[in-house]
Amino acid sequence: MGIEFKVTKPIYDKSLAIEDWQDPKWQLRFSLKKKEDFARYFRLSKQEEEAFDKGSQFNVQTTPYYASLAKDHPEDPIRKIFMPNALELEDQFQRMLDPLDENNNRPSQRIIHRYPDRCLFLVTDYCNVYCRYCTRKHFTGKEQVFPKKDEYQSGLDYIRNTPKIREVILSGGDPLSLSDNRLEQVLKDLREIPHIEIIRIGSRIPVVNPFRITEELAKVLKKYKPVYLMTHFNHPREITRESAEALERIVDHGTPVFNQMVLLNGVNNHPAIIQALSRRLLYLRVKPYYMFQCDPSEGSDYLRTSIEDSLEIQKHLWGKVSGLMMPNYSIDIPGGGGKTSMVPNHQINHEGNTRTFKGFDGKIRQYISPSKQNIKKPMDVESYQQEWDLLNS
Ligand code: SF4
């Protein structure tokens, strides 16, 4: 029988034709942006009203579909993701406009190049929903749907002239907010660069406007393979029948899908929720990949969990869910220090070749390593040395 997912219902007019509700363009046309749009469907709390009245520093927008997943309670997890809150104006701990120092790693207006073999190509700054915790508030939502011709060309030229880049991650904004034609042009241009092997697309569209994931789009991704889709589901309630079908459409066309989630305070920071999300995703052939600590972007303090809380969640999941279901808990070191994985340390002693561990079941066991003089270099390593040197250059 497997896992079943619920179909959404229109929150606007109950007599609305289902074809309209399932039209991705209708979803954008009738997006909720202003206080009065939200007030039609939600009893706004004092802090939510205040956020609208004072003017949020970050764009406000949600598709009606995504809004329909939220309950009329200010603490509802989905609602906390899209609804502005006056707490955004009151950071007490850390407040950075560009927490990953991306602006200092931008060799071209639309390129972020931090790691040697891969770079981000910011192909739009537009999103269907503006998540309150977004890490890229310094760029996202400035209404430049597609890069200007010279910016786009300069991004492509940078990638073409940097042979150590093997992987390009289309990002933004949300790349799947581009039309099929625009997206296909980007994929085609990248595939014409001989050293590009992998293309990744980071998108929250399957979560917030799954109707955009059409058969045609799935075919475009397949045509320019290998393309990997990185989705961004944060909560099991975001997986509906519609989003499940969207994911299956992509996977059925041979595009691998990985999910990156962010731990959010009062939204998903509990092991029961993470396991429920991971279980459902894996069932849909989506690998739970990363579980990120929320970056300290402007206005996100109230949505951030503590590292201690996150480690506790990870400790509870460790050993109880399969490795396939387990996302890697990781922190992006503020200021551009790159990612660091946080894993439970099971080692309790190290003497000579012997390391002693306490397993997830609380029992103590040992691993004895061969000595250093027994370790050999693989005989064919020279065949791969050039590739390795390029990466290190
Ligand atoms: S979809 Fe991604 S880029 Fe857009 S607002 Fe949300 S987190 Fe930021």
Image (cartoon, rainbow, N blue to C red):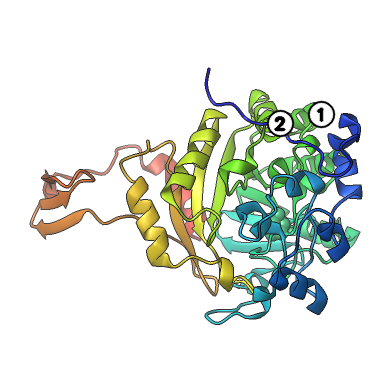
Residue visible at 66% across and 63% down in the picture: 134
Numbered label attached to residue 7: 2
Tell me the residue that label 1 is attached to: 216
Quadrant of the rendered image containing residue 310: bottom left
Residue visible at 62% across and 55% down in the picture: 76
Secondary-structure class at tag 1: helix
Establish whether ligand 1 lies closer than 8 Å to the Cβ of label 2: no
Residue visible at 37% across and 38% down in the picture: 321
Ranked by sequence position, the earlier of labels 1 and 2 is 2
Residue 18 location (% of width, % of height): 86, 30
Q: In front: 19, or 183?
A: 19
Mark 1 vs 2: CB contact within 8 A: no
Taking 142 as reference, is 81 above or below it?
A: above
Q: How packed is label 2: few (under 14 Cα within 10 Å), some, or many (20 or more)?
A: few
Residue visible at 86% across and 52% down in the picture: 31
Secondary-structure class at tag 2: loop
Within the displayed image, which quadrant is ligand 1 positioned in? Answer: bottom right
Q: 32 left or right of 86?
A: right
Given the image, on which type of amino acid does mark 1 rest?
Answer: Glu
Given the image, on which type of amino acid does mark 2 rest?
Answer: Val
Residue 177 location (% of width, % of height): 81, 47
Residue 272 seen in this snapshot: yes
